[in-house]
Amino acid sequence: MGLKNWSGKEKGLALEEFLMRRPTNFNLYLGEQLKDPDFAEKFRKAGEAWDVAIQLASLRKSSGISQKELAKRVGTSQQQISRLESPSYEGHSLILQRHFNL
């Protein structure tokens, strides 16, 4: 059971409890780091960015349109759509998410 399988309070587990179910070195390290409020907040925001990227790509694909077509519809470039669909991109926001209401 990896970290990618944890989704919020799934089955009533807090992230720390989830990590301790399979105490790998990484899970133990992450559990320690999450005790730092600043790190925990950055980790939470990174998870939200990942969710936005995956949702945007999924909605676009389920609508049957390409990145190029979406870009044309919203007045931006295909490269920008690609960045927004990348979980590593740090420019996600709720305003952008609302802008891409497919």
Image (tube, helix red, strand yellow):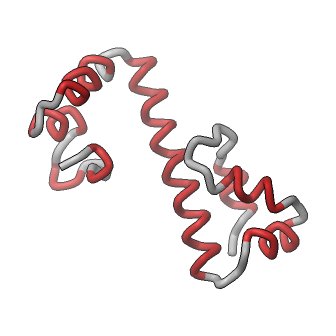
Residue 39 drawn above or below residue 50: above
The answer to which quarter of the image holds residue 23 is top left
Residue 61 horizontal/vertical position (percent):
60, 76
At a point 75% along the width and 61% down the height, the residue shown is: 99
At a point 11% along the width and 38% down the height, the residue shown is: 22
Residue 61 drawn above or below residue 10: below
Residue 37 horizontal/vertical position (percent):
39, 18
At a point 71% along the width and 57% down the height, the residue shown is: 82
In-front residue for pair 74/67: 67
Count of numbered circles on the image: 0
Residue 32 horizontal/vertical position (percent):
25, 18
In-front residue for pair 100/89: 89
Relative to 43, is 95 on the left or the right? right
Considering every residue shown, the one lying at the far left of the view is: 21
Residue 46 drawn above or below residue 97: above
The answer to which quarter of the image holds residue 102 is bottom right
At a point 79% along the width and 55% down the height, the residue shown is: 79
Residue 53 horizontal/vertical position (percent):
58, 55
